[in-house]
Amino acid sequence: MKVLLISSNMAETPYAVYPLGMSMVAAALRTDGHEVVLFDFLQHGQSLDAVRETLRRERPELIGISIRNIDNVNLLNEKRYLDAVRDIARVVREESSARLVLGGSGFSVMPEPVLRAVGADFGIVGEGEWLFRQFVRDAAAGRYPAGRILRAPPSLSGREIPSAAYDSDMLAFYLKSGHMASVQTKRGCEQRCLYCTYPLLEGRAIREREPAAVVDDIQSLVERHQAGYIFFTDSVFNDSRGRYRRLIEEMERRKINVPWTAFFKPGPELDAGIVERMRDTGLKAAEIGSDAPSDATLRGIGKDFRFADVARCNSLFLDAGVATAHYFMFGCPGETEETVREGIANLKSLSRTAIFVFMGIRILPNTGLVKIALHEGLLKEGCDFLEPAYYVSPKVDRSWLETTLKEAFAGSRHIVFPPDALDAKLHFLFKLGFTGSLWDLLLKPKKEPAPQPS
């Protein structure tokens, strides 16, 4: 069966991300002998004409659209992406009679309202490598399910999680723009953060890929595709039981040293020894999941660490010569004017790091934050969550909070508020050929003017 998979992602902040999930589904389908064509909306300049041309040229028998994000989760500068998905679906309907199936993390977070809004035939919630594979097998035989939404439990692990079918042209687009090649090492998240959908999408049990398979992917990306920077997409790279160390051991054994970055969680599992070993395999930058800037608000969102742990984690990486970046949210449950001031002081105490500050938390269905927002009257029963709703503690005034944050971080080079304030600069640097996370580049002191000859 000929299947066209379309990545509808439009987000480029802070950098565009290769559509890894779609490529992993493609690999699974090709295992069964299906012909799979990949199309990336961002790569083609978000052009509906390019979608139309691809449909006419390829004439697929089944079409899937992968949805990564519904919106940009930025209260102060909202960008919504579902309209683009609707437009893609409209072009599909105009050009093809093939069944249209939705999938991806953005769909899986709120499948019923997204399916209604887009008007597709079916939707796959969860791991498409298994369920969509079965769907295509049945479709090839002319069989389709009675229900429109199919749900896959998070169950794949080890070799069951396929290597992505990296598309050379698509990957070249991301790499030449200064971005990174994406690799997944595990699925699942053990944390219990009140706002996060990772455990809902991937389950709470950690399911690792085989370290050898991950390193095979890295070597292929470097040798075949000339990737110069790897981004591990795991929700948290350093799981609490230290299972990620198996991957580091495999990288050491095979003498891998390629620049890479990942998301890290502050906590006692990290120590100077493992940080130095990761640095020696190529770790250049650590994106630390700090999330809240005070002990009270860290407790409020369900974190199991405190701000002192954030500071310690930051120092661990910096002392090893690894650049760091943090993402913090103000307005969390438990936030007051006092904790806002405390949080501002805490952020200013973190040195030699890039900090991106958000105001409010996007409320997503089936998370613990929904119950709090309903109890505090910030959310109405029965909402479908397509219309973005944000949690800001009722103990702080929104206008006061925005003004206070702007004044506190005005003129700061390493603390960015609003969080997208540096987008234009980052995109310009990528176009100049810089690669990687660029936090270290942004943190370098400005050069003094060259002395003029006398």
Image: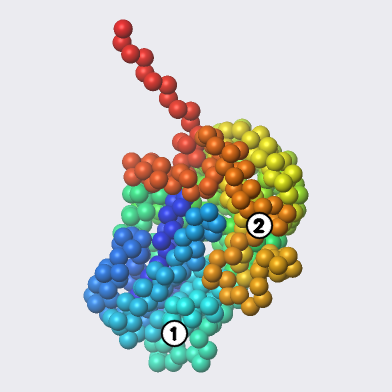
Among the 4 quarters of the image, the one containing residue 174: bottom left
Measuring from the top left, give residue 72's x and y in whole percent.
Answer: 50, 59
Q: Is residue 261 above or below residue 367?
A: above
Measuring from the top left, give residue 377's x and y in whole percent.
Answer: 71, 67
Q: Is residue 23 above or below residue 265?
A: below
Q: Regarding mark 1 in the picture, which secondary structure is present there?
A: loop
Residue at (69, 62) in percent of width and height: 194
In screen coordinates, is 432 left or right of 22? left
In this view of the protein, can residue 127 be seen by the observer?
A: no
Q: Is residue 417 above or below residue 398?
A: above
Which residue appears farthest toward the top when viewing the image? 454
Circle 2 residue:
392
Measuring from the top left, give residue 133's x and y in whole percent.
Answer: 46, 79
Residue at (48, 49) in percent of width and height: 420
**Cα separation between marks 1 and 2:** 37 Å
Measuring from the top left, give residue 243's x and y in whole percent.
Answer: 65, 55
Quadrant the N terminus occupies: bottom left
Residue at (44, 65) in percent of width and height: 81
Amino acid on which disc 2 is placed: Val
The crowding category of the residue bearing disc 1, from other C-alpha atoms within 10 Å (few below 14, some 14 to 19, many at least 20), is some
Amino acid on which disc 1 is placed: Asp
Residue at (55, 57) in percent of width and height: 75
Quadrant the C terminus occupies: top left
Mark number displayed over residue 121:
1
